[in-house]
Image (tube, helix red, strand yellow):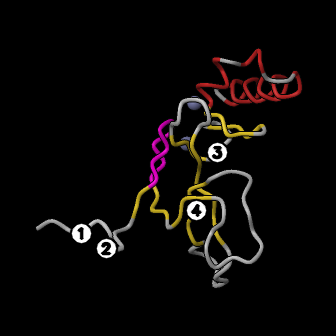
């Protein structure tokens, strides 16, 4: 039996880099049931399951402004610098990011290398 698409079937967000999978309730810049919250970018948003506060929500991820991949907001998957970039595009265009960002990414890489033994 086929379900009608406009029935409230739960939508699923999947990060294309780390495969994080989570249902989301809203995609956009202004989550419903929140007062005066406008996000800097269009995001995949879900209600915070651990909070009784209806206005609390979690940002799961967003879409890369260059390649349109869905990526989570984890530091290993994406970077927000005026727009959302997935790490694949960041690495591809690293020279176009400011030095500060490049330095931060280099630091992160060093740290993850140090963590592997
Ligand atoms: Zn991810
Ligand atoms: Zn990308």
The CB of the residue at mark 3 lies under 8 Å from ligand 1: yes
Q: CA distance from mark 4 to mark 1?
A: 23 Å
Q: Earlier in the sequence, mark 4 or mark 1?
A: 1
Looking at the rendering, the quadrant in which ligand 2 lies is top right
Q: CA distance from mark 1 to mark 2?
A: 6 Å
Q: Earlier in the sequence, mark 3 or mark 4?
A: 4
Secondary structure beneath dot 4 equals strand
Q: Report which residue position mark 4 lands on.
A: 45
Secondary structure beneath dot 2 equals loop
Q: CA distance from mark 3 to mark 4?
A: 14 Å
Residue at the extreme left = 1
Secondary structure beneath dot 3 equals loop
In the image, the segment drawn in magenta is: 13-21
* Residue in the image at 41% along x and 57% along y: 12
Within 10 Å of disc 1 (Cα), the crowding (few <14, some 14-19, many 20+) is few
Q: Earlier in the sequence, mark 2 or mark 4?
A: 2
Q: CA distance from mark 2 to mark 3?
A: 31 Å
Q: Find out whether residue 19 is within the magenta segment.
A: yes
Q: Report which residue position mark 1 lands on.
A: 4
User: For this view, does 72 lie left or right of residue 99?
Assistant: left
Q: CA distance from mark 2 to mark 4?
A: 19 Å
Residue 7's disc number: 2
């Amino acid at each position: 039996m086929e379900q009608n698409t406009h029935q409230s079937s739960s939508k699923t967000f999947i990060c294309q880099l780390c495969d994080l999978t989570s249902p989301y309730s809203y995609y956009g810049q202004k989550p419903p049931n929140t007062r005066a919250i406008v996000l800097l970018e269009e995001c995949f948003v879900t209600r915070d399951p651990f909070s009784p506060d209806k206005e609390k929500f979690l940002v799961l991820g967003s879409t890369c402004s260059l390649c349109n991949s869905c990526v989570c907001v984890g530091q290993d998957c994406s970077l927000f610098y005026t727009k959302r970039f997935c790490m694949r595009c960041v690495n591809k265009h690293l020279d176009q990011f400011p030095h500060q960002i490049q330095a931060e990414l280099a630091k992160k890489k060093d740290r993850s290398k140090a963590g592997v033994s």
